């Protein structure tokens, strides 16, 4: 099981869990007994976040939402490059039905998410 920290988007913010091929989002009122989850096959796009990609998904997720405290004022890629143990990757993901989210996870989990859309 891997942790995926959801920062913003069309899914609840907080700690999501990736187990096998299911990403389960934090429970919020109105989600029902099991909460919201998606299969990795529902992902249409997973890309490392940059200022441009965050602005591109627009509306729901804005660059200002992310904030300098989470991603740093100089840009995302400086401290968030994949590779090596313990590194975190901030990424944007979009589902086939147009929902999107901005999240951070470890490099290994990021690679698994990218492989799911390849």
Image (cartoon, grey):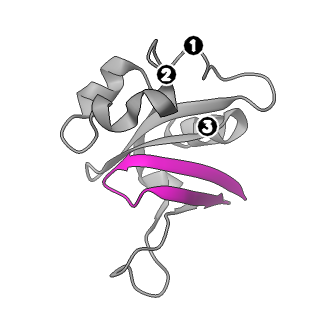
Q: Earlier in the sequence, mark 3 or mark 2?
A: 2
Compared to 114, does 56 lie above or below? Answer: above
- Say whether marks 1 and 2 touch (CB < 8 Å): yes
- The N terminus - image quarter: bottom right
- Residue 86 location (% of width, % of height): 78, 32
User: In the image shown, does 78 or 111 lie closer to the viewer?
Assistant: 78
Q: Earlier in the sequence, mark 1 or mark 3?
A: 1
Q: Residues within 10 Å of mark 3 (few under 14, many from 20)?
A: many
Q: Is residue 110 among the parts visible in the rendering?
A: yes
The magenta span reads 1-19
- Residue 28 location (% of width, % of height): 40, 74
Quarter of the image holding residue 65?
top left
Q: Is residue 21 among the parts visible in the rendering?
A: no
What residue lies at 49% left-to-right and 39% top-to-bottom? 117
- Residue 100 location (% of width, % of height): 33, 46
Residue linked to disc 1? 78
Report the side of 58 relative to 107 (left or right): left
């Amino acid at each position: 099981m891997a942790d995926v920290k959801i920062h913003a988007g069309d899914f609840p913010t907080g700690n999501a869990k990736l187990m096998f091929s299911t990403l389960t989002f934090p429970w919020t009122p109105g989600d029902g007994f099991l909460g919201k989850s998606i299969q990795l096959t529902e992902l249409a796009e997973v890309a490392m976040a940059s200022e441009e990609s965050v602005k591109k998904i627009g509306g729901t997720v804005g660059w200002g939402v992310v904030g300098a405290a989470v991603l740093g004022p100089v840009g995302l890629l400086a401290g968030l490059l994949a590779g090596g143990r313990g590194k975190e990757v901030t990424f944007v993901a979009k589902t086939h039905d147009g929902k999107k989210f901005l999240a951070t996870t470890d490099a290994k989990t990021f690679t698994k998410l990218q492989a799911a859309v390849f």
